[in-house]
Amino acid sequence: MDELSLFTQALGLAKPWNVVEVVFSKDTGRLDLQIDFPRGATFLCPTCGKGDCPVHDTKERTWRHLNFFQYETYIHARVPRTDCATCGVVQVEVPWARPGSGFTLLFEMLVLQFSREMSVDAVAKTVHTGANRIWRILQRYVDRARRKVDLSGFHVLGIDEFSVRKGHDYMTAFSDIDAARIVHVAETREHTAIREFTDEMKSRGYPLADIRLVCCDMWDPYLLGLSRYLPHTNVVFDRFHIMKKMNAAVDDVRRQEQKQVPGLKRSRFIWLKNPCNLTDRQSAVLMNLKKLDLKTARAYQLKLALARFWEITSLPEATRYLRKWCSWALRSRLPQVIMMARTIRSRWQGVINYTLARISNGVVEGLNSKIKTAMKRAYGFKSPSYLKTIVYLVAGKLCFD
């Protein structure tokens, strides 16, 4: 087998295409492959699919291909335009690249795989091309792959925000909790983010009535948006966000009390941890502090009692338990805990719904961790559209055919 036949098979070319010339320059570190077709060859019409269309004319084109070892490789070919009796003169689509691209399909797939684990700037330096060209590749493939995502099994929606940069600058991630993937990203965390999500789902032909459950925190703009644009869904408040609020209340009690009780200083994480996660030394410190009849100890006991609520699976039992807890918390004479009890009462149905649905935003938090990792290695993004592209790439479970 000669080198031309070898490269023809390596590129997966079928008739009438074949490699007719191979030029390698060690000085420039470059390999050039010339692809051509024999005189008199005919092609399928790319519009109607009619076969045996003669060539009208050709135009010389060049594509960047995967490196041959450490050497940059380029493909050159005369791209024909067919003369179809039905469609007229139409340019043929070559099998190794998408229309209008200056890269081969294999090169673009390599860029997609690299971009899942590396920053775009690092990918551009690795493949020796401009970052803007990498972004165009990513946005084209990500947009196309998102349009092809099958949403037929999407029934449980998770909503959570993530910080874009320091300060109050957030985006909202909408996730399919069952499939553990992000389906939409909004550039705000106001109630309009819910409208933006529903509008996109409608444009993709997804029936919003299929969303049965929504898991989110108690952020008022989200609840306003859900009541306006997804009124038929049952809202389940994320248990981790509720316990985070309760931990904040306990810590606030400790901060105020440590002014009178110096022993509470440097004990913050002892009160925030679950008892089973404490070290032997921390357990001993906790036991000694609880003997002092502290307000912090009372708040801590109320936190542990609230944590037991999430283990109850019977709705009547869970309702009775939470009512007793709220009554206990309201009589605690601890303003922070009283406020927490009032918050739960005002959001009662969403808290109780956890007993029936048994869902949380744990999956969403895991997806947010992937987003933060991508943001950290990129040191920020020039525009929100770039960030959204990377979010879909690393957390959207997209399939690139």
Image: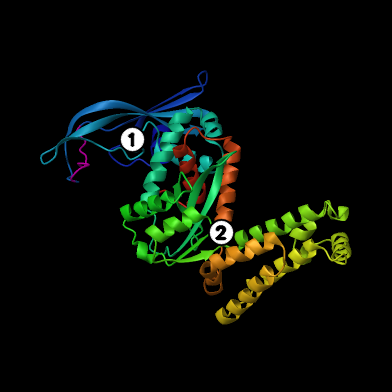
Instruction: Determine crowd level at label 1: few under 14, some 14-19, many 20+ residues with C-alpha closer than 10 A.
Output: many
**Residue at the (41%, 39%) spot, across then down:** 139
Total number of numbered labels?
Answer: 2
Magenta region includes residue 41? yes
- Residue underneath mark 1: 18
Residue 338 visible within the image:
yes
Q: Earlier in the sequence, mark 1 or mark 2?
A: 1
Instruction: Determine crowd level at label 2: few under 14, some 14-19, many 20+ residues with C-alpha closer than 10 A.
Output: some
Q: Which amino acid does the dot numbered 2 rest on? A: Val
- Residue underneath mark 2: 363
**Residue at the (49%, 51%) spot, across then down:** 173
* 285 is higher (above) or lower (below) than 311: above
Distance from label 1 to label 2 (Cα)? Answer: 49 Å
User: Is residue 124 shown left or right of residue 9?
Assistant: right
What colour scheme has been applied to the protein in the rendered image? rainbow
Element type where label 2 sits in the image: helix
Classified by dominant secondary structure, the portion drawn in magenta counts as: loop
- Residue 17 in picture, x, y percent from top left: 30, 36
- Residue 45 in picture, x, y percent from top left: 19, 41
Q: Quadrant of residue 247?
A: bottom right
* 94 is higher (above) or lower (below) than 27: below
Give the residues in magenta. Answer: 40-48
**Residue at the (54%, 65%) spot, across then down:** 346
- Residue 273 in picture, x, y percent from top left: 75, 60
**Residue at the (38%, 66%) spot, across then down:** 210
Quarter of the image with the N terminus in it: top left
User: Is residue 282 shown left or right of residue 174?
Assistant: right
Element type where label 1 sits in the image: strand
Residue 399 visible within the image:
no
Q: Which amino acid does the dot numbered 1 rest on? A: Asn
User: Is residue 265 shown left or right of residue 221?
Assistant: right
